[in-house]
Amino acid sequence: MQRPKIKNEHWPVRYGDDVVRIGGIVPGIAKNIPDPDGWVWALLGLLDGTRTVDQVVAELVHRFPAKPADEVHTEVRVDLVKLVEAGYVEDAAELPPEGLTAGERERYSRGRALLGWMDLSVRQSSWDIQMRLRQARVVVVGVGGVGGVAALSLALSGVGELHLVEPDVVEMSNLNRQVLFTERDVGRPKVEAAVERLRYHNSDIAVTGAALTITGAAMLAALAARFDVLVLTADQPREIRSWANQACVRTGTAWVHGGYHGPWVNVGMYRPGTGPCYDCAYVADREHQARLPPRTPAPCGRTPAPHPANAISAGIAGHRVAHAAMSLITGVPPLPANQEYGTSLVTFADSVVLGPSAPRPDCPACGSEAQTRP
């Protein structure tokens, strides 16, 4: 590292005379460092990207004359390694990446800063995460309210290749929540309008589409095998999430699903081979439901109601789906996979819906019996 620099978003603040906080105020990133003699504060203040390591050492030798020069040199090297490994330091002298044009670097500069803020891993370049997005291939199955927002977020964030799958046409009732479509699109195939809109938003990436109706796991497996991540935002037929899970277990493809049940927004993210799959959790939940007292619906019938959703519920679900997909691609932030996440729009309360801690032998997708099935 030629000219070490504390990331702007992690710039330290001193509390009183003996504590330095680095990493801002975000839980999971911020850290308090004891500093009784002012050494940490002095060191961090010099890591502004204008000095080499040797220049930092020379300045600290001057500021702390009671310490032997060789001791200062050792302490700086040790502390700098700790700061780099903690993810707080980048190299101000790094060269621009070869895989991104000047226009792309300008386009993604704000996203790069956010990804760097969340990233606590050691990187060769602060552009490494953006390059992973640039090289990624994602298929989005279902381009309605949730899928449209997810696809738009992924396109704007710089995912290099997006493929959209959607069989329906645009209807007027879609326009309260499906952000890729306008009144002029009513009657058009959704996939045609969505591909056109995403290309307008980002001409640096590849966007394609197909008006396919998914009829089973085999179709999803054929899609998943071509991509790094499968995003499932279609909700019909009812078993489509199990189909996606079976397909991705078969192909080893990471996948995300998301949607909403009225004001309850849910997202699940899975990386096959690293823990229980979607169907493991489904089997466990079915067993749990079987142990509960029987449920009896009220005798009065319910009148079929319109799809209960708006731009808020679809948008929150779509953005969370895209965030989960980007986590699977880049590891930033390192969200735990193989579980479900939910948010209540009534209370803003979040929850993690934990499934089994390990794959189930009786799972129809990843269990031992399923693996021996032809």
Image (cartoon, rainbow, N blue to C red):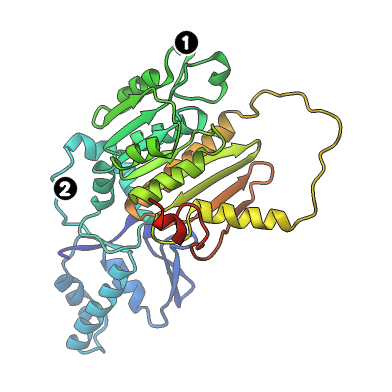
Rendered location of residue 127, percent (x, y): 24, 50
At mark 2, the secondary structure is loop
Mark 2 crowd level (few <14, some 14–19, many ≥20, 10 Å Cα): some
**Residue at coordinates 38% horizontally, 41% vertically from top-left?**
230
Taking the view exactly as shown, the residue that stands out farthest to the front is 374
**Residue at coordinates 31% horizontally, 47% vertically from top-left?**
112
Q: Is residue 34 above or below residue 249?
A: below
At mark 1, the secondary structure is loop
Q: Label 2 sits on what residue type?
A: Pro
Rendered location of residue 347, percent (x, y): 68, 46
Q: Label 1 sits on what residue type?
A: Gly
Q: Quadrant of the N terminus?
A: bottom left
**Residue at coordinates 47% horizontally, 20% vertically from top-left?**
168
- Answer whether residue 367 is visible to the viewer in this image: no
Q: Is residue 24 above or below residue 34?
A: above
Query: Residue 307, labelled with which disc?
Result: none
The residue to which callout 1 is attached is 187
The residue to which callout 2 is attached is 97
Q: Indicate which disc, 2 or 1, sits on the residue closer to the N terminus.
A: 2
Mark 1 crowd level (few <14, some 14–19, many ≥20, 10 Å Cα): few
Mark 2 vs mark 1, CA separation in Å:
43 Å
Q: Is residue 205 above or below residue 362?
A: above
